[in-house]
């Protein structure tokens, strides 16, 4: 639109904000930035409630206090709820201005998910305002979006495609291919430990090499592309999953280099053992599935939130194990000089019996034979059930809460991908 003045005024619920035309054009709120592209007053009125041409003022009949907090997000990159305002009402304001739940801080996002769950709005639609893939950004990314143009913007979209499986349809397709290769690689790894594997490998050696080379090639290409697209290369290298990827990929190339040099891995002694250990690190590729499966994400989030309860559980177990193992060693071995129970010859040996008794596993390989030892065993089992049950309650409730939060987010991501397909 050809603005009459260089200064544009936004009137939101009676509160005025003045910006230059350049700021309006690159404004992080999509509804405001779209004003610059309007060619007629009719198009302007589709975005705002009224327009004063003389004063170049745009009227928005929206919640003024909520917009104050949204403006704080524009300036600082942090979006939080307005105190005293209903979460769903503020969420409506967010949708109006072109924001979504991903822009909220994690604490407020949790509050919104709980509020939606309480009133049974798990499927609350964000389709009132169709969000494209460019709008599904984190708070820091939205502020940076002003400077992303041309090649930089294209690289940013490509980075999200490889890093966030839920960012677009293409990202989901790439993630599905990656999951297939992980599964194939795990099947090959498990099959390689079977007794008949070496015999079968002699008859189909070429097929095995091709499958293994294709899997390793995909993981290598994926790792290299993600490294090249990473914003911070040092953070990428330090990430645990990326370290596991490198450890799992490297043995294949080391083996190929040694084979080319006439040094078969079976005759390398200690080096061969180390190489086989590193080869088994491929099993950790299964952790990549956590990016795609809700259950594994829930488990990881629960463990991260409940680390205090997990530490408390370990303390309970270790204290009880130290007490019961010392008493068991004394009753079964220390006090019986005629026929001591050799299974309890030391406290560490008795600790094995304590841990399998407290967890109610009871393999039966070690058991008390004296009367007082059996009484102690009964006390050990009962106390183990009680001690394990105490923190488990907190972990269970946290697991349910984490699962519900991730389920809501997954539903929102699915609606975004559906909107992309329909468009």
Image: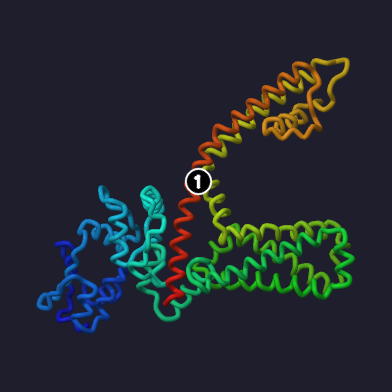
Q: Which residue is mark 1?
A: 400
Q: Position of residue 75 (x, y in %)?
A: 30, 62
In this view, 330 is above or below 411:
above
Quarter of the rendering occupied by the N terminus: bottom left
Q: Residue furthest left?
A: 54
Label 1 environment density (alpha carbons within 10 Å; few <14, some 14–19, many ≥20): few
Element under disc 1: helix
Can residue 372 be seen? yes
In this view, 281 is above or below 352:
below
Quarter of the rendering occupied by the C terminus: bottom left
Q: Nearer the viewer, residue 329 or 374?
A: 374
Q: Residue at x 54, y 42 (%)?
A: 307
Q: Residue furthest front?
A: 120
Number of labels in the image equals 1
* Left or right: 8 in relation to 416: left
Q: Position of residue 125 (x, y in %)?
A: 37, 62
Q: Residue at x 19, y 69 (%)?
A: 10
Q: Residue at x 48, y 71 (%)?
A: 168
Q: Position of residue 291 (x, y in %)?
A: 56, 60
Q: Position of residue 367 (x, y in %)?
A: 79, 27
* Left or right: 14 in relation to 379: left
- Image quadrant where residue 408 sits: bottom left
């Amino acid at each position: 639109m050809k603005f009459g003045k260089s200064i544009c005024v936004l009137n939101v619920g009676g509160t005025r904000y003045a910006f230059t035309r350049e700021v309006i054009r690159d404004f992080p709120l999509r509804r405001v930035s779209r004003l610059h592209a309007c060619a007629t007053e009719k198009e302007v009125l589709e975005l705002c409630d009224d327009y004063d041409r003389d004063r170049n003022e745009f009227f928005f009949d929206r919640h003024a206090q909520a917009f104050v907090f949204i403006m704080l997000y524009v300036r600082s990159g942090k979006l939080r709820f307005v105190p005293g305002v209903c979460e769903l009402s503020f969420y409506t304001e967010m949708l109006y201005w072109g924001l979504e739940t991903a822009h909220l801080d994690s604490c407020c996002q949790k509050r919104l998910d709980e509020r939606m769950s309480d009133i049974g709005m798990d499927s609350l639609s964000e389709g009132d305002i169709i969000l494209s893939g460019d709008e599904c950004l984190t708070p820091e990314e939205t502020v940076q979006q002003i400077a992303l143009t041309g090649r930089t913007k294209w690289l940013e979209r490509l980075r999200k495609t490889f890093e966030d499986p839920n960012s677009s349809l293409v990202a989901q397709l790439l993630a599905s291919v990656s999951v297939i290769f992980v599964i194939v690689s795990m099947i090959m790894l498990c099959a390689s430990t079977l007794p008949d594997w070496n015999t079968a490998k002699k008859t189909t050696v070429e097929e095995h090499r091709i499958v293994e080379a294709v899997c390793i090639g995909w993981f290598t290409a994926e790792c290299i592309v993600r490294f090249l697209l990473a914003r911070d290369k040092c953070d990428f290298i330090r990430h645990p999953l990326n370290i596991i990827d490198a450890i799992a990929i490297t043995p294949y190339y080391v083996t190929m280099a040694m084979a080319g040099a006439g040094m078969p891995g079976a005759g390398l002694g200690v080096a061969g053992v180390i190489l086989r250990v590193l080869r088994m690190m491929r099993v950790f590729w299964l952790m990549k599935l956590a990016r795609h499966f809700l259950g594994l994400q829930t488990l990881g989030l629960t463990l991260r939130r409940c680390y205090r309860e997990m530490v408390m559980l370990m303390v309970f177990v270790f204290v009880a194990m130290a007490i019961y193992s010392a008493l068991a060693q004394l009753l079964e071995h220390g006090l019986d000089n005629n026929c001591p129970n050799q299974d309890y010859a030391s406290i560490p040996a008795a600790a094995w019996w304590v841990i399998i008794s407290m967890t109610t596993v009871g393999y039966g390989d070690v058991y008390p034979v004296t009367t007082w030892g059996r009484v102690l065993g009964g006390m050990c089992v009962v106390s183990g059930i009680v001690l394990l049950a105490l923190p488990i309650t907190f972990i269970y409730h946290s697991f349910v809460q984490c699962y519900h939060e991730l389920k809501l987010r997954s539903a929102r991501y699915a609606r975004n991908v559906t909107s992309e397909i329909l468009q």
